[in-house]
Image: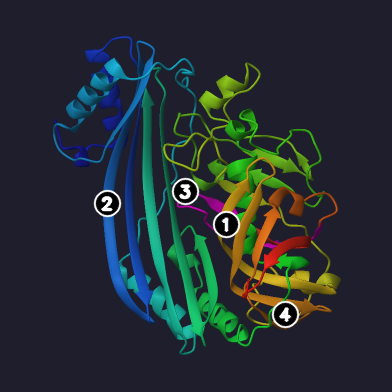
Amino acid sequence: MNATADIDGAELAARVVDAVISRAPGTQVEVMVERTDQALTRFANSAIHQNVADESTVVRVRLHRDGRTVTIASNRRGDHVVVDLVDRALDAARTGPRDAGWPGLAPPSVIEAPAAAPSPGPPAQRAAAVKAFVDAAGGLETAGYARSTRTEVAFANSAGHHAEAVHAWSAVDGIARHTGHDGMARTAADTLGAIDTAALGARAAAKARQSALPRELPAGRYPVILEPAAAADLLWTLCAHGFNGKAVGQRQSFAEVGTAQFDPLVTIVDDAGAQGVTFDADGTPTRLLVLVDAGITSALTFDRRTAAETGASVSSTGHAFVQGPGGPVATNVTMQPVVRGAGDQAVAPEFVDPAAAPLLAGVEQALLVSDFWYTRVLDPKALAITGLTRNGVWLVENGAVTGAVTNLRFTQEYPAALAPGSVHGVGPVATGFLQAWSQSRLAVPALRLASWNFTGGASG
């Protein structure tokens, strides 16, 4: 048998399935092979200090036999990896716990053939991207990374289902520092060449410079304009903990399908297939799923297990993950922009994210927030979150930015921030997309919200 590194992913998956069936007829088995080619260039003190590249193959076997379900994975390479995987999986199945909730295998279905996706470029390409970011910062100290990843996925199971997919992405994330204050700019795209790293560096530097001499504001509720990076945290948290079918089944989510839980300006759509992710870890095809339709919660995400646990009328939406935040989660999400007329445009300083600039017009008073970090769930049912602002906060008065503000801590129920009557503006979607983790793609607009609960400032 050839080494696994030389075998096509689809062929390798089929070999493992055949090996299990030949050793243990009647076993239900599924195999996923992921081959990832990734490259990363890091920089600090405005100079590259690390450049690494990695190629890996991970074979994951999940089988159900005699009422027991086990999962075994290996990233080993060599002639005997298939035999080793099958031996370990069958051995584990003899003593594994009983699994009364096993939903069975995904049946055969038609999955579109994968489109081409680029491999990570040479180190010189990432070095050029870093140089453009650093040069555009105009002498400020900078740090960050440029990264590119390509993943091929092959799936096979003993029910006769086979599927393949390939997807790629690149990301640049950096900060610039001025007098102890950081400015941030980040984005991701299908290719590194699609990212304007000079524009990112210039914006990060402008944010840092405009963060000097911040004033401190008292705790309280303030209207906010969330730039896309901050809005992405809100959107991701809603998807991970709110629209998650497992969380709803455990009564740990606010989501109620058919209820107007959000402002009519809010529409949230998940469409992994448009990004090349055409099936999930169960082998279920992905499809477009409208989670919120003009303010009405209209769908939840399910994998095969949570769908089976929920009831016969529910089917998987194609959101199973090998590793993830827990339960079926929408990860290729767009919050739809709301198109405004030309009269609503505003002239904004260069440090304001272009996606947020139109929302400044007509604002009597609000806080412009670049980014959130260290956000944690306090109450999963209400989805109350605590966290901090980061990388720039400014006071907006009468449509103009009037000065920097110190970082603030907040405790905010995220669904309440988007409740009916609470959304005063949804801007255009930011160029590129943002990531909450490596398998997520969030196309996020800036948001103008009526209220955000800040519980403390720089001094407590």
Q: Which mark is residue 439?
A: 3
Q: Earlier in the sequence, mark 4 or mark 1?
A: 4
Residue 437 magenta-drawn? yes
Relative height, residue 204 to residue 91 (above, below): below
- Any part of residue 432 in sight: no
Amino acid beneath label 4: Ala
Amino acid beneath label 1: Thr
Is mark 2 in CB contact (under 8 Å) with mark 3?
Answer: no
- Any part of residue 115 in sight: yes
Q: Which mark is residue 55?
A: 2
Q: Distance of mark 2 from mark 3, alpha carbons?
A: 17 Å
Q: Distance of mark 2 from mark 4, alpha carbons?
A: 44 Å
Relative height, residue 53 to residue 328 (above, below): below
Amino acid beneath label 2: Glu
Is mark 3 in CB contact (under 8 Å) with mark 1?
Answer: no
Residue carrying label 1? 375
- SS of the residue under disc 1: strand
Q: Nearer the viewer, mark 4 or mark 1?
A: 1
Q: Distance of mark 2 from mark 1, alpha carbons?
A: 32 Å
Quarter assignment of residue 300: top right
Residue carrying label 4? 348
Q: Position of residue 110 (x, y in %)?
A: 49, 27
| Residue that lies at the very extreme toward the bottom in this rendered image | 139
Quarter assignment of residue 343: bottom right
